Amino acid sequence: MSIAQTHVAVIGAGPSGLMAAEVLAQGGARVTVYDAMPSAGRKFLMAGRGGLNLTHSEALPAFLARYRAAMPQLAAAIEVFPPDRLRQWSEQLGQPTFVGSSGRVFPKAFKASPLLRAWLRRLDSMGVQLKLRQRWTGWDGQGRLLFETPDGTQTIEASATVLALGGGSWPRLGSDGGWTETLGSKGVTILPLRPANCGFTVAWSDIFRDRFEGLPLKGIALTFGAHIVRGEAVITHTGIEGGAIYALSADLRETIVDSGQATLLIALRPDLSINELVARLSMPKGKQSFSNWLRKTAHLSPVGIGLLQEAAIASGASLPSLSPEKLAGLINAIPVQLNGVAPIARAISTAGGISFDELDADLMIRRLPGVFAAGEMLDWEAPTGGYLLQASFATGAAAGRGALKYLATE
């Protein structure tokens, strides 16, 4: 049977699945993409709400190192479909990109919807069919794919299948992790899905939480162990989240899992040395309130001052009683006790998934010949900054190539 006579099912209409479908269609296969949601790319569109961060411009060796333990398993896919190629692909769809001041890469339109619309038009022109409201539930006794649809249970014959169902974050957008039980029942080793790029819980005082919930801490530096990250964080009702927190989330999460808590150090004025801060804090207070004096001398925000108060109360000290030296030290090393990880449903992404030991070099699940997996279903995690989408696109393309290779040998 020629590839043109084969039917390939791609399950999941996110970046990984759609990229697999494109590669398969380019290779001559007849492709249908199935998705449980009423429209394609829902999480992709959510990712583009604040500006679609497609990838990152740093050199490839440093880029690959962002995937930490999974770098050896992801390197081949990303080297074939690297950031430059992703940018070219976007431009071919009429969405040129630019490099931001942080090195992150964005479409000039700065959102996902124009890119997704152009992509779906291209796939349609290639003959790719898109079937929505089709929830995959596994296989029947004859190896046919099973879907729950508005018209009842449907069975589909496929010569090969690409699974691109996402992780377990933002389940309302379609990635609910339900596939773990389906594959687990087939003996596939799956590492438990865990929150990644996530927030953490803190036992804030009622006064601090009620006053500062939703407010940002800007221009700060966060330290955990040997890692220091500059950026922003946001106080939440139950704790703290934000870009700088996400960058440390893997290490923070594992420490909390192991010991029940983690101590994060927050520097409110990381550009000032201790000596500079001491000099400022040695200025007379006069008739100002302590908070106003701190705000003016150290240029601290109300939420930053509130955070200092939280730390002082936790240590049993009175903030105004601290010497300039101790106050300066606290301002640039506020200890915040994290006592839990925010729920997976609120995480940007997830860690865990199908063990790479279950996959061959073409991302085929060895126990399930002809079944390939891509994207966040695999056991990897990466920080925000374009690394998540890049690996999703790249593994989707790799699974598509793998499926074509499999079909050519059947």
Image (cartoon, rainbow, N blue to C red):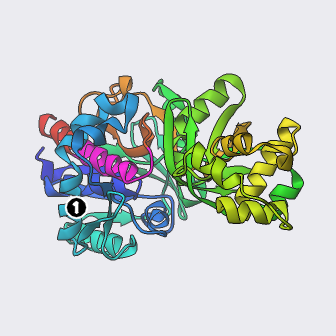
Identify the residue at horizontal 84%, vertical 39% (top origin): 314
Compared with 346, 47 (above or below) is: below
Compared with 323, 113 (above or below) is: below
Compared with 63, 56 (above or below) is: below
For numbered disc 1, what is the local secondary structure?
A: helix
- On the picture, is 371 further left or further right than 263? left
Q: Which residue is mark 1?
A: 87
Depth check, front residue: 318 or 15: 318
Q: Quadrant of the C terminus?
A: top left
The answer to whether one can see residue 372 in this image is yes
- Expressed as whole percent of the image width and height from the top left, the position of residue 49 reads 48, 70
- Residue 79 lies in the magenta-colored region: no
- Which image quadrant is residue 237 in? bottom right
Region in magenta: 383-400
Identify the residue at horizontal 36%, vertical 58% (top origin): 102
- Expressed as whole percent of the image width and height from the top left, the position of residue 190 reads 49, 29
The answer to whether one can see residue 300 in this image is no
- On the picture, is 69 further left or further right than 5? right
- Expressed as whole percent of the image width and height from the top left, the position of residue 9 reads 33, 51
Residue type for callout 1: Arg
Identify the residue at horizontal 64%, vertical 38% (top origin): 264
- Which image quadrant is residue 406 in? top left
- Residue 385 lies in the magenta-colored region: yes
